[in-house]
Amino acid sequence: MPTNKKKEKALEATPITDFHGRRRELLKIGVEQGYLDWKQLDDAFNKEFISDTELEVLLFTCEQMGIEIKNRPTA
């Protein structure tokens, strides 16, 4: 089973413009850990390549998969 370091390297190797690839890698990490930190989400996506709608869908998907989002900024 790959370690988190290997999974993080796989995430880093995914092109910044590949939203779906990065999303898939983040979800794998989140399922394994049971959570994702907001910084992981922020670091994974360049603001130019993720819309507010895509972010909301990602957060909804995490919720549905039982992945907690830690340190989420408050509005």
Image (cartoon, grey):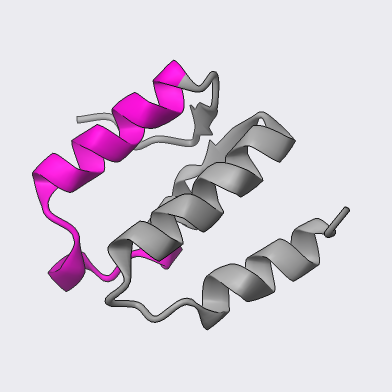
Against 30, is 65 above or below? above
* Region rendered in magenta: 43-64
Against 14, is 29 above or below? above
Q: Quadrant of the C terminus?
A: top left
Of 45 and 20, which appears nearest the observer? 20
Q: Residue 31: x percent and y percent?
A: 64, 34
Of 28 and 51, which appears nearest the observer? 28
Q: Residue 61: x percent and y percent?
A: 37, 29
Q: Name which residue lies at 54% across and 56% down.
A: 25
Q: Is residue 52 magenta?
A: yes
Q: Is residue 26 left or right of residue 73?
A: right
Image quarter of residue 21 = bottom left
Report the predominant secondary structure element of the magenta stretch: helix
Q: Is residue 61 magenta?
A: yes
Q: Residue 28: x percent and y percent?
A: 60, 46
Q: Is residue 14 left or right of residue 17?
A: right
Q: Is residue 73 left or right of residue 5?
A: left
Q: Name which residue lies at 41% across and 53% down.
A: 23
Q: Residue 3: x percent and y percent?
A: 84, 59
- Count of numbered badges drawn on the protein: 0
Q: Name which residue lies at 23% across and 44% down.
A: 55
Q: Name which residue lies at 60% across and 39% down.
A: 30
Q: Is residue 25 left or right of residue 7?
A: left
